[in-house]
Image (cartoon, helix red, strand yellow):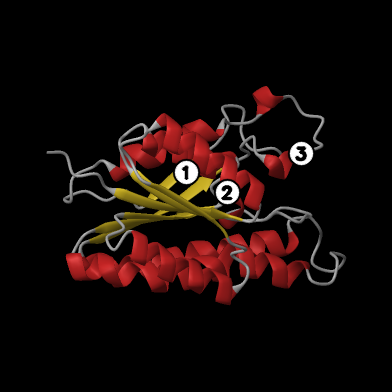
């Protein structure tokens, strides 16, 4: 009898998050996820439940920038799925602007969404992985985590910080059999690029990022992919 594994994905209704839902569902995973838009959550819940009737899906509306909302979501997630095998801290927001000129509040919003959400959810979900001596955490960093660029402002800062947190978490969890992988995608065709006049062919499809995460998750316990760095064939967009 096959034992289905479970994956938790934040920011699950669009872009890389949605690609992850679909990719792992095809591999018979139970999926739990959250996103801000309640209507999109409802549509995703219905579609995935109808497409994969033998699997469990649990999608909830949650603003991950709210510590209280995120902690409530984590409690519910563990009630529904006491054993979560993979955690993907995917939710993020991109608000362009230079440090000296970006709008007031951009710093707080991006730090809360891009960094604090991963911190708080990791603290809530990882203990059950440690108890079972197995699990895998993927943090969606960015090439902006390793290369600053003009007009990157607080976004770059938040992604540098998430990359640092990922490194710390990896060292802390090594003795417990829990893997930690930093995912550093370059320009990917998601809502963050809405309004661009660049052709879609200049970006990577979200599905490629999801495939790389799946491959890393399928390796044996003896091997750990510490980082996934992936860029468009023509390079980053300057």
> In this view of the protein, can residue 26 be seen by the observer?
yes
Labels 3, 2: front one: 3
**Gap between marks 3 and 2 measured at Cα:** 19 Å
Secondary structure under the numbered disc 2 in the rendered image: helix
Along the polypeptide, which appears first: circle 3 or circle 2? 2
Q: Secondary structure at mark 1?
A: strand
> Residue 194, which numbered label?
3
Q: Nearer the viewer, residue 76 or 148?
A: 76
From the viewer's perspective, is residue 224 above or below residue 176?
A: above
Total label count? 3
Q: Earlier in the sequence, mark 1 or mark 3?
A: 3
- The residue at which mark 1 appears reads as 229
- Report x, y in % for residue 225: 32, 48
Would you call the spot at circle 1 few (<14 residues within 10 Å), some (14-19), or many (20 or more)?
some
- Nearer mark to the viewer, of 1 and 3: 3
If the image is split into quadrants, where does the C terminus sit?
top right
Relative to 132, residue 59 above or below? above
Could you tell whether 72 is left or right of 81 in the image? Answer: right
Image coordinates of residue 181 in percent, x first then y, are: 38, 54
Residue 148: x and y in percent read 66, 56
* Residue 154 placement: quadrant: bottom right
**Above or below 105: residue 199:** above
User: Crowding at label 2, few (<14), some or many (≥20) Cα neighbours within 10 Å?
Assistant: many
Q: Residue at x 61, y 33 (%)?
A: 235
Q: Are marks 1 and 3 in contact (CB under 8 Å)?
A: no
- Residue plotted at (53% across, 64% down): 162
CB-based contact (under 8 Å), mark 1 and mark 2: yes
């Amino acid at each position: 009898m096959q034992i289905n594994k479970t994956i938790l994905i934040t920011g699950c209704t669009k872009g890389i998050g949605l690609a992850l839902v679909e990719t792992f569902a095809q591999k018979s995973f139970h999926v739990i996820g959250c996103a801000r838009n309640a209507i999109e959550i409802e549509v995703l819940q219905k579609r995935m439940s109808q497409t994969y009737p033998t699997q469990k899906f649990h999608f909830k509306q949650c603003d991950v920038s709210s510590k209280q909302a995120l902690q409530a979501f984590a409690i519910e997630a563990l009630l529904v799925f006491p054993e979560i095998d993979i955690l993907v801290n995917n939710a993020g927001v991109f608000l362009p602007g230079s440090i000296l000129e970006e709008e007031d509040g951009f710093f707080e919003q991006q730090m809360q969404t891009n960094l604090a959400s991963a911190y708080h959810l990791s603290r809530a979900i990882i203990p059950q992985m440690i108890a079972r001596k197995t699990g895998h955490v993927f943090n969606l960093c960015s090439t902006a985590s390793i290369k600053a660029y003009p007009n990157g402002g607080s976004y770059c800062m938040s992604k540098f910080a998430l990359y640092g947190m990922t490194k710390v978490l990896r060292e802390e969890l090594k003795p417990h059999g829990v893997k930690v992988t930093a995912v550093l995608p370059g320009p990917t065709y998601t809502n963050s690029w809405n309004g661009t006049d660049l052709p879609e062919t200049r970006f990577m499809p979200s599905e490629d990022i999801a495939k790389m995460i799946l491959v890393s998750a399928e390796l044996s316990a003896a091997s750990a992919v510490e980082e996934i760095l992936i860029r468009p064939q023509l390079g980053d967009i300057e």
